[in-house]
Amino acid sequence: MKKSNLYLFLTVGALGVLALSTKLTAATDTMPSCCMGGMTTPMASEVSTNATPDLLTTCPVSGEKLGEMGKPFTFTYKDQEVKLCCKGCKKDFDKDPEKHLAKIRAADKK
């Protein structure tokens, strides 16, 4: 009887570990490279080759220097290239894009 209980315990434990490792693997696939939000890097189709370049060296949302947290998150908004320090800043950018675009355009004039 004791031996069968041990096998049962080991089987249940192994299944638990398997279930947990599957959940951890799925969570890792959606984790961001730097900020919150489960974001991924942009696809090449998200960045237009005809967009006006973003000459700003800092993130227009957070003010962080671009490149300090890894490769900047780059996308196109109304034919303007936008570089953010991370994908997590995109949510804040989307709340008031014109405010952040003004910072990018000011850098273009310098």
Image (cartoon, rainbow, N blue to C red):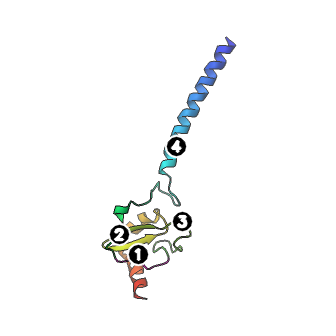
Q: Which residue is mark 3?
A: 70
Q: Secondary structure at mark 4?
A: helix
- The part of the chain drawn in magenta is 52-57
Q: Which mark is first along the chain, 1 or 4?
A: 4
Amino acid of disc 4? Thr
Graded by Cα atoms within 10 Å as few (under 14), some (14 to 19) or many (20 or more), the crowding at tag 3 reads: few
| Magenta segment main secondary structure | loop
The three-letter code of the residue at mark 3 reads Gly
Looking at the image, is mark 2 or mark 1 earlier in the sequence?
A: 2
Q: Residue at x 47, y 62 (%)?
A: 88
Q: Quadrant of the C terminus?
A: bottom left
Viewer-nearest of discs 2 and 1: 2
Left or right of 102? Residue 30 is right
Residue 98 picture location, percent across and down: 35, 75
Mark 2 and mark 1: Cα distance apart in space: 13 Å
Question: Magenta stretch containing residue 64, yes or no?
Answer: no
Q: Amino acid at mark 1?
A: His
* Chain-order first, disc 2 or disc 3: 3
How much space separates mark 1 and mark 3, taking CA atoms?
21 Å
Q: Residues within 10 Å of mark 1 (few under 14, many from 20)?
A: some
Checking the image for residue 21, the label placed there is none
Q: Which dot marks residue 76?
A: 2
Circle 4/circle 3 CB separation < 8 Å: no
* Residue at numbered disc 4: 25
* Precedes in sequence: disc 1 or disc 3: 3
Estimate the spatial distance between the alpha carbons at disc 2 and disc 4, rounded to whole Å. 31 Å
